[in-house]
Every structure is written in C-alpha cells, then in structure tokens.
Image (cartoon, helix red, strand yellow):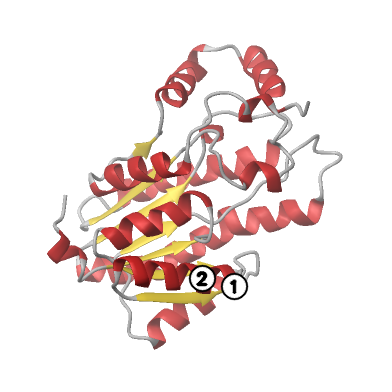
Amino acid sequence: MENREQNNKRTVLITGTTSGIGYDLSKIFAAEGFNLVLVSRNEQKLNAQKEYLKKRFGGEVYTIVKDLSDPKAPTEVFSDVLSQGIHIDILINNAGFNESGPFYETNLEKELQMLQVHIASLTHLTKLFLPGMIKNKYGKILNFGSTGSFAPCPLDAVYCASKAYVLSFSSALRAELSRTGVTVSTLCPGATKTEFAKKANMETALLFKRFVMKPQKVAEIAYRDLMRNKKVIIPGLYNRLLVLSFPFTPSKILEKIGMALLKRR
C-alpha cells in the first residue's frame, strides 16, 4: 500500500461517478489523499459531488461532463485532461448500466449504447491513458466486470456478454503489461444496493432480493485489492462461491438458475 504523501501526488480518473460504487470510490480516493478527475453525464450531480468532496476532504477535484455512450466522448475526455496538464495515474472504468429482459423485447438503442459504454468507451479510454502510465512506469487500471462476466445469463444476454469482454480484455492486457509498472484489475461485483436495479427495472428480480451488498463495502474491497494489484476482485463470500461453482455446474442448470434469478416478479 502507498502512503498518503505519495497519494497526494497522484490523480485518479473515475467514470460514472455520481452514484453507486463509483461515488463511494471517489470518497475513498479523496480520503486517501488522491486528486480526482470525475466523469459523468449529469452536470448537476457532478457539481454537487465536487463541492461535497472538496469541502470534506480537500484536494483537487476536476470534473468533466460527458456521456460515454457518445463515441466521441473518450477522445474529448482525454483532450480535456491533457489541456489541463493532468497526468492520470489510476483509471477507473466504472460507467455502465443495464437493459434486461428477453432479448426479443429489450430496447435495441439502449443495448447499443450499453455496448458503447461497457466495451468501446472502456477500451478507448484505456488505449488513450495507458501510454502515459507506461512512460511514467506507474499506473493502475480498474475495469468493472460482474459476476455475470463468468457465464452467459438468459434475460441479461447483452449485459453479461459485454462484461465477459471486460474480463477477457483486462486479463489479457494485464499479462501484456507485466513488466511495465502498470497493473490491470477487474472488479466483478454481484447484486449491489444502488440505482442500477431500479434503472434497469430489475428491482423485483430474485437477484436483488438476496445477498445484496452495500456499495460502500464493495468500494472498500475494490480499493484495497486494486492497491494490492489483485487480478480479479469478487466482493462478498456468496459471490465468490457462486463464481467458483460455475465451471462445475452443467450449462442447462446454470441457465435455469440465471432465469430464476433475473425473472421479474
């Protein structure tokens, strides 16, 4: 672990930061002395978050209003950061949302936006900020996967497929960077008590009725294990056991379990 004196010379960029795990991560990084660059599409919430963090923790907080479902957004974020003379030491690709339900009924536009945020923008931002980290011989990247990264999930086909990409991409990139001073970690949370389920109309699903973690706890585990350079971070014993069971569970049973967990009541 690094000390606070080292931290206050480093800057972390967090996407999708105005609620949920991203919001709690911003508080943890601010408390640990990091400077922050916060990216969100909600300007009002972003300004309120900046004011709160500066008042409570001090330190530098720079905000960028961008919607990462726009293909131009990653380049614009990168250009904005460069124009301010900011070097990003830690990149947290947290932004994301869900569009669940039977694939033949779900909204195509939302699913294409989800793929843009989860896959294209995450990859693009990583591509842009990584060379500076390599040059500096220091960097950490935290990409947000899911317990759904490990197995296809009926009624959430596109979301889980996108999160499978995140896990595969992050693991391969981590291996490539093994001698550079830059590490890549993947956070794979299960059900978490955030606005995520409500926005996806999943509040009545069994998945969000049992073993739901608080975002503060997930963020604490994510921060701790990121700073320890852990490859894959799965918060919560239930979630770790669930993921460990996947390779030993017949696919037909996995599909039935997935359907049962995500079916809206």
Q: Secondary structure at mark 1?
A: helix
Above or below, comparing residue 245 to residue 24 in the picture: above
- Number of other residues with Cα within 10 Å of mark 1, as a class: few under 14, some 14 to 19, many 20 or more: few
Residue at horizontal 59%, vertical 73%?
Answer: 44
Q: Nearer the viewer, residue 96 or 76?
A: 96
Residue for badge 1: 44
Q: Nearer the viewer, residue 115 or 45?
A: 45
Tally of numbered tags: 2
Above or below, comparing residue 231 to residue 208 in the picture: below
For badge 2, the amino acid type reads: Ala
Q: Position of residue 196 (x, y in %)?
A: 62, 46
Residue for badge 2: 48
The CA span between labels 1 and 2 is 6 Å
C-beta proximity under 8 Å, tags 1 and 2: yes
Q: Quadrant of the C terminus?
A: top right
Q: Position of residue 228 (x, y in %)?
A: 23, 44
- Number of other residues with Cα within 10 Å of mark 2, as a class: few under 14, some 14 to 19, many 20 or more: few
The answer to whether 210 appears left or right of 112 in the picture is: left
The answer to whether 200 appears left or right of 39 in the picture is: right
